[in-house]
Amino acid sequence: MKENLTCEECGRELIALIDGTVTPSVARVIERHAASCASCGEALQVYRRQALRLRRMEVLPAPAFARGSAWCAKSWERGVS
């Protein structure tokens, strides 16, 4: 990844940064851009707050009619019933 990102390039990488799916060197480039750009910095903070709220949410069991369907397969893998 290049060292100087445009806002468009940075925006495409913010979620990956939050998810921890970028390399440390890429994370530094994204963080550096976000620190120097009010718009991208605000977007990063919004995404971080959203991610924190999601992590704090209770995982509810799938409704009976949906158990075994493809969209709740991940819940079953985690042992949520």
Image (tube, rainbow, N blue to C red):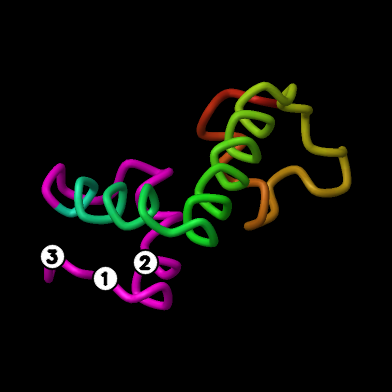
Indicate left or right for 41 with 72 as reference: left
Mark 2 Cα within 10 Å, few/some/many (few <14, many 20+)?
many
Residue at point 60%, 29% (across, down): 52
Q: Secondary structure at mark 2?
A: helix
The residue that mark 1 highlights is 5
Q: Secondary structure at mark 1?
A: loop
Distance, label 1 to label 2, CA atoms, is: 6 Å
- In depth, the one of 72 and 2 nearer the eye is 2
Indicate left or right for 48 with 12 as reference: right
**Kind of residue at badge 2:** Cys
The residue that mark 2 highlights is 10
Q: Main secondary structure of the magenta part?
A: helix
**Image quadrant in which you'd find residue 56:** top right
Please identify the quadrant where the C terminus is shown.
top right
Distance, label 1 to label 3, CA atoms, is: 6 Å
**Kind of residue at badge 3:** Glu
The residue that mark 3 highlights is 3
